[in-house]
Image (cartoon, rainbow, N blue to C red):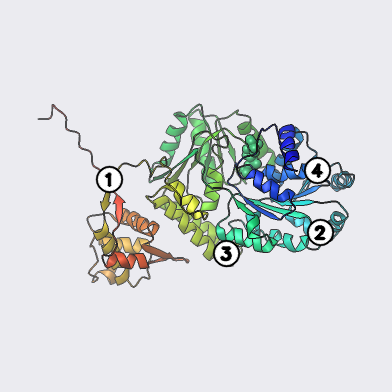
Amino acid sequence: MLLLAQQILKQYFGYQSFRIGQQQVIDNVLNGKDTLCVMPTGGGKSLCYQVPALCMEGTTLVISPLISLMKDQVDLLHSNGISAAYINSSLTYSEINQTMLDVKNGTIKLLYIAPERLEHNEFRAELSQLNIPLVAIDEAHCISQWGHDFRPSYRKVSSLLSLWAKKPTVIALTATATPTVSQDICSLLHINSNDSFITGFSRDNLSFKVLIGENRDQYIKKYVQSNLNEVGIIYATTRKSVEAVYELLLKNGVGVAKYHGGMGEEERTREQNRFLQDEVQVMVATNAFGMGINKTNVRFVLHYQMPRNMESYYQEAGRAGRDGLPSECILLYSSSDEQTQRFLIDQAQDRSRIPLELEKLQRMVDYCHTENCLQSYIIEYFGETNTTECGQCSNCIDERPKMDVTEDAQKVLSCVVRMGQKFGKTITAQVLAGSRNKKMESFRQLSTFGILKAMSAKDIANFIEFLISERVLLVQPGQFPTIYVSDEGKDVLMGKRKVWRRTKVEITTIRNDDP
Ligand code: ADP
């Protein structure tokens, strides 16, 4: 069977061999085992169900979350000479009927649908008459409430599938699953833990960088202009900032396209195509852009602002370097980004998800403040252990010496304790800085008031963020998040543990002609 899979790989896709992970996953699926495939963006997940689909008799059903994603996949399959189709709300009633006829006649090898469609009894009844050997659930993290993109209709897929007379093999695929999300997917779809394949999350050709407090506009302008032969994506959080960055680059003579949810579909498609066909150098977009985009030569992904969680960040940053060539992923952070994301999270319809979203946001903020290897941070977030330093991220190549900041850390921690561990980082920073702010009245008598007054409140706030990323301080999420001392922090207070931090080095140039 695997031989047939290899033949299909060459014949239809023009590739010589499977990548790491692909072969095991395909083998497992072809042996009829329900399978979970977690592979980084660009890892080659599509082939993991497309090749088995071509090896099997009948039509493979693919559950996909987005209309644009379905269309892209189907177009790509057509260009490889594979018969595929989709059914979604963009089709007319008669087009849907025609597609179903084609499926019944056995001329369609892969049929893409949205999960909601499975909830139509009539449609399900029609499907149950067909020969469906395999169901592929793409973007399977949408199944899990612990994921970053939960879709209730995804969760229903498993129970709907169990109503099928002849149970098809199921393959669930995702790029972004923490261990909790993977376990959730497996338990819902009854996938055996031996049948979950988690390919290394590290993408060795990507170098990560976090820049705090840069002038973002200046940086982006300079970066794009000094990489004129390279293609890249700039992600911004809001439509308004997409428009602003787009205008900025346009004004500076950069070939640029834009993409966000506020634009009409026609305009979005036009802009997307300009980017895909290399007519422009840069795409400026919100997170609405990118799913299913198969552009391999993206050399940089810049984040104009911090996204809401690590899953989104890695998914978006991972669109760089799909061809395996060295590429950069740069995040421009400012503390106001956290407020923006907090505000957006607070708009959520489903209030029960807010605590989880806030926790995820905190891990994203920690990423921006850690001084450890960024690549390791990411892949540990996704549950890998025994990581080694990448040697190329902005932290790994940072040559500033590490200083022992235990004493300053103790001052912060004891201040937090004295304030009753029920205030946020901004107020704490102001207390430590000895601010004249009126709100400080009730804190003036604390022995830690003004104890770090040599530093500005802003620098202290950054230091607090750093201590959070080191997990000596923890955040109690909520509308007004508060900080408290962790067990590791207590060890610091008791002198059992040291804290090291890179410090700015002042370089004084001594000129020979100085008097
Ligand atoms: P994912 O869905 O995991 O993000 P894709 O399935 O879109 O990734 O694959 C990413 C790119 O890698 C595509 O251009 C695809 O054609 C290519 N690719 C996938 N498998 C192989 C392979 N075995 N050999 C060479 N290229 C491959």
Q: Residues within 10 Å of mark 1 (few under 14, many from 20)?
A: few
Q: Amino acid at mark 1?
A: Pro
Q: Earlier in the sequence, mark 4 or mark 3?
A: 4
**Residue marked by disc 4:** 109
Depth check, front residue: 112 or 45: 45
217 or 506, nearer to the observer: 506
Give how far across and how far down residue 145 sits, in percent: 61, 62
Q: Amino acid at mark 2?
A: His
Q: Is residue 222 left or right of residue 360?
A: left
Decide: few, some or many residues near mark 4? Use Cα within 10 Å; few <14, some 14-19, many ≥20: many
Q: What's the CA distance linking mark 1 and mark 3?
A: 41 Å
Q: Does residue 66 appear in the picture of this structure?
A: no
Q: Are marks 4 and 1 in contact (CB under 8 Å)?
A: no
Q: Position of residue 155 (x, y in %)?
A: 69, 61
Q: Quadrant of residue 143?
A: bottom right
Give the residue type that dot 4 points to: Lys
Q: Residues within 10 Å of mark 2 (few under 14, many from 20)?
A: few
Task: Report ligand 1 position as a quadrant.
Answer: top right
SS at badge 2: loop
Residue 260 visible: yes
Q: Which residue is mark 2?
A: 120
User: Which one is nearer the viewer's eye here, 82 or 225?
Assistant: 82
| Number of numbered discs overlaid on the protein picture | 4
Q: Earlier in the sequence, mark 1 or mark 3?
A: 3
Q: Mark 1 and ligand 1: say if the CB distance to the nearest ligand atom is below 8 Å.
A: no
Camera-side mark, 4 or 3: 4
Q: Nearer the viewer, mark 1 or mark 3?
A: 1
